[in-house]
Amino acid sequence: MILRVAQVIMVALAPTLVAASDPPRTMSELLAHSTTADWRRLDPANTLYLQLDTGRVIIELAPEFAPRHVANIRALTHEHFYDGLAVERVQDNFVVQWGDPTQRRPVGTAARTLPAEFTQPVGPSLPFTRLPDADGYAPSVGFTLGLPAARDASGTTTWLVHCYGALGVGRDNDADSGGGTELYVVIGHAPRQLDRNATVVGRVVSGMELLATLPRGTGPLGFYERPQQGAVIRSVRLAADLPAPERTTIEVLRTDTPLFARLVAARRNRTDDWYKVPAGYIDLCNVPLPVRISAPSPSG
Amino acid sequence: MILRVAQVIMVALAPTLVAASDPPRTMSELLAHSTTADWRRLDPANTLYLQLDTGRVIIELAPEFAPRHVANIRALTHEHFYDGLAVERVQDNFVVQWGDPTQRRPVGTAARTLPAEFTQPVGPSLPFTRLPDADGYAPSVGFTLGLPAARDASGTTTWLVHCYGALGVGRDNDADSGGGTELYVVIGHAPRQLDRNATVVGRVVSGMELLATLPRGTGPLGFYERPQQGAVIRSVRLAADLPAPERTTIEVLRTDTPLFARLVAARRNRTDDWYKVPAGYIDLCNVPLPVRISAPSPSG
């Protein structure tokens, strides 16, 4: 086992190898020093469980950034709109997308389309922890409510960023043609050109590997050529609608704490023994957002 | 089918929908206007075929950036060193890695370790087409011999960049402890912190989906907990060593042409109808490097 791990391209020192007087210098060491105040528990009212045959994908919704779309996705979930649909599209290094290919499935009390929520006005409900590193796509970037976010030059408008794991709303060419009946998740290098062109409604916090390993579609844009090729979505449920024993107790590291700032600094300039040249920079989408599952559900 | 493709998040207009007088504005339209001079055929002496049960992964080696490592990987290939090894590690949003977990497999005429080739001196064999967009990780970035590359501030040193699909050499903490017996491919958001910390020897040009969909390892750093979980590498061969009918005839778009500059411009500011806000910027690792396979091998 030691030999197997010897030639890896990222070595995480075990805490026992670090003298007690050494300051923590890697992410795992910093997390070992975290306190309960450094973590936040996902709000069950904003947590979606996407159930595939291979397991549970856990999504955090961001109503502060897309209030109408998140409310509509909740409504579609309550209608069981997504249950039994399949993944339609998996484009390598881009997105997984699911929805209703017929566009005829009833939406019940939900809306089929909504006005776009590509950006939001900055306000007290959208605090911002700025990342000092320059970004090519936006005047400033950082974290809002634990999610990668950007702001315009005047600081009056904000939007969620398409990092790996971002959940967005598919639409037609009309900006207002989406509503949540088609959803996508980023599975590759951040397609930042989508920022401010699609409504981002949240982020996958657990189970990304279940989406990222899906077979790529061989049709145009990664659509499956035969619909039955796509993984079936057994159900989508709001955590709040499930009895407690069926929920996954999951915490995400807060992004507005001194510990998180130290973690970002530790990732910007790696000081573990493997690295010879510190990067001196970190891209927003390379900042890890650690998650810990304290009580997995039996079915999770 | 039209309904299925309607609500997608990237719409590629079919060439027939564009009036003949319109200038090409999307990648597919630009590629439709390309000439043979815009493409380069892979050199069989620098093309590796990694054969999995699911298909052929095609890798372009970059001897100009890592002459000793590429020569050694050729030697290991000739020794059939890789044949029958398995993928050891698949870390989501990071890398796939394969090699010899015992580190005891004979290397024959090859070397087990080599001095690092993290960077190369700039010279006439390493021309550079600079991308005008600023980069956080390097003073300047662009393309050299068709590969994403960076240069230092003085323009005297260059290195290959860890974009999606980059092929690198695994090593231990010692910079000179790698040699090609452990290799990795980037399968997620570009881990640019690895730049200048690992010897990059090339890039996957076809078959990335075969690597990117491999099951993630559940051990530390994405290692498989049981070696038999990893996909078996049936063989690694140099294209030049195979009879012509077994080769894949593959071309990659040149990165030093006016057409490529137009393609980058078209991707920096999308003008197709889906996009409402042009990005005004493109990240090096978001620049597409189109490939066309003119004559697939029967086994490919």
Image (cartoon, coloured by chain):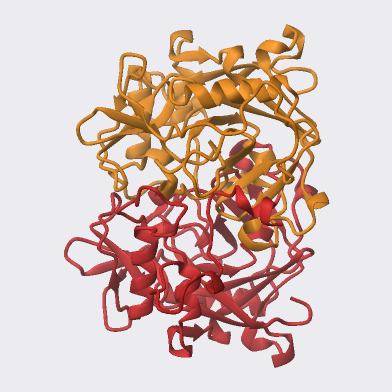
Chain colours: A orange, B red
Q: Can see residue B99? A: no
Q: Nearer the viewer, residue A210 or A100?
A: A100
Residue B71 vertical placement versus A241 (above, below):
below
Q: Nearer the viewer, residue B46 or A210?
A: A210
Q: Quadrant of residue B231?
A: bottom right
Q: Quadrant of residue A211?
A: top right
Residue A49 vertical placement versus B227 (above, below):
above
Query: x, y percentage for residue B197?
Result: 39, 54
Residue B164 vertical placement versus A71 (above, below):
below
Q: Nearer the viewer, residue A160 or A295?
A: A160
Residue A282 vertical placement versus A229 (above, below):
above
Q: Can see residue A238? A: yes
Q: Nearer the viewer, residue A190 or B166?
A: A190
Query: x, y percentage for residue B214?
Result: 70, 51
Residue at x 63% of width, y 46% of height: A96
Residue at x 65% of width, y 20% of height: A75
Residue at x 44% of width, y 28% of height: A147
**In the rendered image, which quarter contains the N terminus of chain B?**
bottom right
- Tell me if A183 is positioned left or right of B21 in this view: right
Query: x, y percentage for residue A107?
Result: 70, 28
- Tell me if B232 is positioned left or right of A126 in this view: right
